[in-house]
Image (spheres, rainbow, N blue to C red):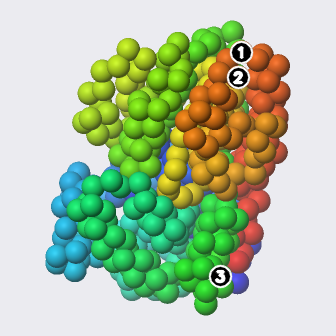
Amino acid sequence: MLTSAPRVMLFCSRLPSNIQGGVDLRVRNQILALASLGPTAVFALTGSGKIVTPSLEMWRSSTDPKSVEDVNTMTILSKVVSENRGPYWNRFSDVTANELESAIREFKPDVIIVSRLALMPYAQRILDTGVKTVVLDMDEPTFDTRTSIASIIDNPGVALLYKRYSEALTKYEKEMVSLSSCVWLSSKQESEKFVRSHPTFENYFIVPNVVNADEYEIAPEKRILGRIIFAANFAYEPNLDGVHFILDELLPRLPSASIDLVGAHMVDWVRKIVHSQVNVVGQVAGIAPYFSQASVAIVPLRAGGGTRLKALEAMASGVPVVSTSFGVEGLDVADGHDVLIADGADAFAKSCSELEEDAQLRKRLVTNALFRVRDQYSLPKLKISLASALQSA
């Protein structure tokens, strides 16, 4: 059991000075909440941006670019399968490990939070420093997530390679969980998946994804009817599947609509989309202006895991959300009350059209969704959750 205000170091992939995706947002909000609870340090593989809160005692990243080099996905998969490498072999650097050890000796944390499974190649080096409490912020267990992603891959060769990779990842996850003092998951649904994969590991805790609603602009006068936004990380297979759904199934059913694709890590084929109804925006410094102009935010996911921070961001921005059931899994939202849930192209297009045509429906969803965000998915709620989670670690 930890003291009331342990010294906490958060080890993350990138210093989240500017938000480039859901992982950055989860990490940034955890940093803000942790720093309000007690002494907090941050060490990352990369990043050099402005510190997110002056109350941090350390804000540092590795000097070695090796661990964040862009390695082709197929190269990663093939080396795991053919050379029996760990699934995140490309994330490890001896230079970074040495710098991390130095930061640990300087800050002397009681707890280290490893913000992603992808950073667990450093786990043994962390333990070798004498730190007793290592928390793995898994967000989502890999088995169910990878199984669902495999179901949307059409190429048989890629699907087989992905299956082999998933098997290696599942084995690796079990090994890394065994090195952890505690595991954090993002929702009740993800914790249930975790228990199925790790039935004997009992020290897990739900640390929800949240947003700071005060950071988002609610400006109904800027809304453009018929303008839809899909905000996502476009290197993530389920989001790419969502783009295919938009192009092949949704837009033919919504001939007067336009769709903004907004987000980081766009693969070439998405970046090169030429379509009269599609505006390929890409990575932006801030997503608020795009949410403020959108009349509908969509979450057309059929696979993946975790909770959907982009759905929460849309709700905080006063944008009504249309999502598949899978797209809001893990969020405590009700169809017709907070969001519209639609599975299948016809139902999805119908829900988008209803929101464009029914001002009262839009107003009801926006009002209820904003209340839901402020009541359940806010920074104060995260602070309470983290305080309990640290005591449980």
Residue neighbourhood size for the residue with mark 2, other residues' Cα within 10 Å, grouped as few (<14), some (14–19), many (≥20)? some
Q: Is residue 386 above or below residue 231?
A: below
Amino acid marked by disc 2:
Glu
Q: CA distance from mark 2 to mark 1?
A: 5 Å
SS category of the residue bearing label 2? helix
Amino acid marked by disc 1:
Glu
Closer to us: 112 or 108 = 112
Residue neighbourhood size for the residue with mark 3, other residues' Cα within 10 Å, grouped as few (<14), some (14–19), many (≥20)? some
Q: Which quarter of the figure is the N terminus placed in?
A: bottom right
Closer to us: 244 or 54 = 244
SS category of the residue bearing label 3? loop
The quadrant holding residue 38 is bottom right
Amino acid marked by disc 3:
Asn
Q: Position of residue 193 (x, y in %)?
A: 60, 72
Q: Position of residue 385 (x, y in %)?
A: 73, 62
Q: Position of residue 117 (x, y in %)?
A: 44, 68
- Residue at the extreme top of the image, as rendered: 221
Q: Is residue 202 left or right of residue 337?
A: left
SS category of the residue bearing label 1? helix
Task: Count the numbered circles shown.
Answer: 3
Q: Would residue 197 be visible to someone looking at this image?
A: yes
Residue 203 image label: 3
Closer to us: 235 or 144 = 144
Give the labeled residue for mark 2.
354
Q: Is residue 387 above or below residue 353?
A: below
Circle 2/circle 1 CB separation < 8 Å: yes
Residue neighbourhood size for the residue with mark 1, other residues' Cα within 10 Å, grouped as few (<14), some (14–19), many (≥20)? few
Q: Is residue 244 above or below residue 392?
A: above
Give the labeled residue for mark 1.
357
